[in-house]
Image (spheres, helix red, strand yellow):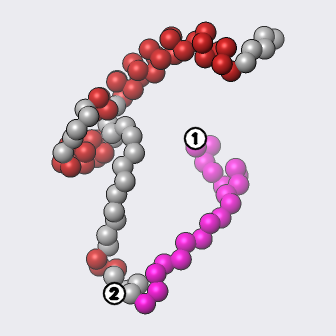
């Protein structure tokens, strides 16, 4: 067993790992190199599954406004055990 600190491991392995990571990301998410995209382009990449990153969105459900006008939905936080999660997750 070899014991090294995380910073040492990064110095030793970072260059190789960085190339592997860049190659993987470029193959699976080709749109990530595009700095500015239109709304249409973003939606297309999300629908195709080629979008890489985070989007901040506003969700509007006009058809539910009347239903929830007096009381908004309540969200419940719950702990989920490992037995309740599928094997592939």
Rate crowding at label 2 as few (under 14), some (14 to 19) or many (20 or more) other CA atoms within 10 Å.
few
8 vs 49, left or right, is right
Q: Nearer the viewer, residue 89 or 59?
A: 59
33 vs 82, left or right, is left
Q: Secondary structure at mark 2?
A: loop
Residue 6 drawn in magenta: no
**Percent position of residue 45, x then y:** 27, 41
Between tags 2 and 1, which lies in front?
2
Q: Secondary structure at mark 1?
A: loop
Q: Which residues are magenta?
A: 70-89
**Percent position of residue 26, x then y:** 34, 24
77 vs 82: above or below:
below
25 vs 33, left or right, is right
Q: Which mark is residue 66?
A: 2
Q: Using the numbered discs, state the Cα–Cα distance from disc 2 to disc 1 in whole angstroms.
A: 40 Å
Residue that appears at 81% across and 11% down: 1
Residue that appears at 26% across and 34% down: 35
Question: Where is mark 1, residue-wise?
Answer: 88
Q: Earlier in the sequence, mark 2 or mark 1?
A: 2
Residue that appears at 67% across and 57% down: 80
- Quarter of the figure with the C terminus: top right
In the figure, residue 37 lies in which quadrant? top left
Q: List the single residue furthest toward the bottom.
A: 70
Q: Main secondary structure of the magenta part?
A: loop
Residue that appears at 18% across and 45% down: 38
């Amino acid at each position: 067993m070899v014991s090294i600190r995380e910073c040492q491991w990064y110095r030793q392995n970072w260059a190789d790992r960085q190339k592997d990571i860049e190659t993987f990301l470029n193959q699976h998410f080709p749109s990530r190199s595009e700095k500015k995209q239109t709304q249409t382009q973003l939606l297309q990449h999300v629908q195709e599954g080629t979008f890489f990153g985070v989007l901040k969105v506003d969700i509007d459900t006009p058809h539910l406004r009347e239903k929830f006008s007096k009381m908004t939905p309540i969200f419940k936080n719950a702990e989920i055990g490992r037995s309740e999660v599928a094997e592939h997750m």
